[in-house]
Amino acid sequence: MTKSKQPLNASLSSGSKEKKAKIFYEHGTDALGLALSIAKMQEDKASRKAGKHHQPQAGKPRSKRKETGDKKKRLDETKAVIAKQRAQSKKGKARSRKESKNQLRHPADSIANVQGSAPRKRVSFA
């Protein structure tokens, strides 16, 4: 493993590139210390990143979730009432149509009976 180190006599105003001196670590305690420091830095970085995503929202109360449930419940109740009203109006329209048809048929039957002729036989083709 290598670590680069800038020379102490490098001037900031000079624009020329100077070679960096390399320091070689021997295997053992130096390598272990370097690995531990790198691992600690990585863990800190990961925990900070995870902390950003998993912070609890202190400003939001949990009661809002119930309010949305109440709103949905009221909406479902309103939909049920509307569906019931539609069904009743549909039944009422069908009933009125049926009554109007019956009123049209009854006077025709009574006129036929008054004349004394037998009612016509109906034939259906299936």
Image (cartoon, rainbow, N blue to C red):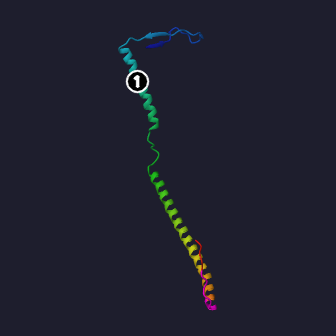
Hey, which quadrant is residue 25 in on the image? top left
| Residue designated by label 1 | 39
Number of on-image labels = 1
Residue 22 on image: x %, y %:
47, 10
Local secondary structure at mark 1: helix
Whether residue 120 is in magenta: the answer is: yes
- Which residue does the image show at 56% across and 70% down from the upper left? 90
- Residue 111 percent across, percent down from the top left: 63, 88
In front: 42, or 114? Answer: 114
Q: Is residue 82 left or right of residue 44?
A: right
Tell me the chief SS of the magenta region: loop
Task: Locate the N terminus and report the quarter of the image it occupies.
Answer: top left
Task: Name above or below for residue 30 compared with residue 76.
Answer: above
Q: Residue 118's x, y, as percent? A: 60, 88
Which region shows up in magenta? 113-121
Residue 19: in magenta span: no
Which quarter of the image is occupied by the C terminus?
A: bottom right
Amino acid marked by disc 1: Ala
